[in-house]
Image (cartoon, rainbow, N blue to C red):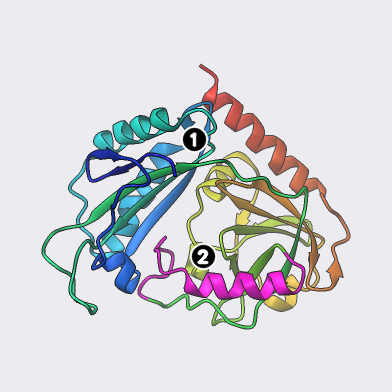
């Protein structure tokens, strides 16, 4: 296993690291970020660190390490694992604690790890799952390590030959995927669910909204059933066209909105990383 960074120290992946009483292990009390690494650089790191802090605040986790210190640690762990690093994972847990929901007094555990990049198919088939996202949850919109719901939903989609699961929310509106945001072409507009739907404030979603003409608006599941085109976004897949929703082939894959978004994001990425 690759070298990791744990609370200020580099450790071999073979060394003991997380304690058995860590709250992240015991009750899923933690947050995380995954960033794409390109040529040794973590893409959009400032935005990822900002979202990490927003998730920490939402969970009541006190992050005493500064963004500058985290950025230096990111560079350190990437350098320790080059070549072949394609993604960075930053995880913060509640730290060692009792065998229950209450936190201990030792403070959080911070782990940085790297791995190879993801290879995604040219297009995705998706399945709408029968379990809604709770947009009124205390952790709605936070990037927490409590991913059991996503694991179950993705397994449901995989069993049906799909690559991603799509959630509606309790209001009956389109929300998000298990690890992605979704954009749809509907009535001549490019639309993505608003953050009030309960979806994650995705970094790729955020960047695209600054680059292209798209609107944030609720999309009912009845409207979703008649979309012309759609695509998924995430920090590792960038822009991925959707070919099928359940058993319905979308009329256009990739459609014009999808092509525009993919071109705009590729140009942004090149601009950002160009020395």
Which labelled disc corresponds to residue 199? 2
Q: Is residue 112 above or below residue 102?
A: above
The residue range painted magenta reads: 138-162
Residue 158 is inside the magenta segment: yes
- Residue in the foreground of this view, choosing between 128 and 120: 120
Q: How many marks?
A: 2
**Measured from the top left, where is residue 31 in percent x and y?**
35, 59
Query: Measuring 48% from the left and 27% from the top, which residue is drawn there?
Result: 40
Residue 40 appears anywhere in the view: yes
Assess disc 2: are there few (<14), some (14-19) or many (≥20) residues with their C-alpha within 10 Å of its C-alpha: many
State the residue position of label 1.
Answer: 43
**Measured from the top left, where is residue 268 in percent x and y?**
59, 31
Quarter of the figure with the N terminus: top left
Assess disc 1: are there few (<14), some (14-19) or many (≥20) residues with their C-alpha within 10 Å of its C-alpha: some
Q: Which mark sits nearer the N-terminus, 2 or 1?
A: 1
Q: Is residue 174 above or below residue 95?
A: below
Quadrant hosting residue 25: bottom left
């Amino acid at each position: 296993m690759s070298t990791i960074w744990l609370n200020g120290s580099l450790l071999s992946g073979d060394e003991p690291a997380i304690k058995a009483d860590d709250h992240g292990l015991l009750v899923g009390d933690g947050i995380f970020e995954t960033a794409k690494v390109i040529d040794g650089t973590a893409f959009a790191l400032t935005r990822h660190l900002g979202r990490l802090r927003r998730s920490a605040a939402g969970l009541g986790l006190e992050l005493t390490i500064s963004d500058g210190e985290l950025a230096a640690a990111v560079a350190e762990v990437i350098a320790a694992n080059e070549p072949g690093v394609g993604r960075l994972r930053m995880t913060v847990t509640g730290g060692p604690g009792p065998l229950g929901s209450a936190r201990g007094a030792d403070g959080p555990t911070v782990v940085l790890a790297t791995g190879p990049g993801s290879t995604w198919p040219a297009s995705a088939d998706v399945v709408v799952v029968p379990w809604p996202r709770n947009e009124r949850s205390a952790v709605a919109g936070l990037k927490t390590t409590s991913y059991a719901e996503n694991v179950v939903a993705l397994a449901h989609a995989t069993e049906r030959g799909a690559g991603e699961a799509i959630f509606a929310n309790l209001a009956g509106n389109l929300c998000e995927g298990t690890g992605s945001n979704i954009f749809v072409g509907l009535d001549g507009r490019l639309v993505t669910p608003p953050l009030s739907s309960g979806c994650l404030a995705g970094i790729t979603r955020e960047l695209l909204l600054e680059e292209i003409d798209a609107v944030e608006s609720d999309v009912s599941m009845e409207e979703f059933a008649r979309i012309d085109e759609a695509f998924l976004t995430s920090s590792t897949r960038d822009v991925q066209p959707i070919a099928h929703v359940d058993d319905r082939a979308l009329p256009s894959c990739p459609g014009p909105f999808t092509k525009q978004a993919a071109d705009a994001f590729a140009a942004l990425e090149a601009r950002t990383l160009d020395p």
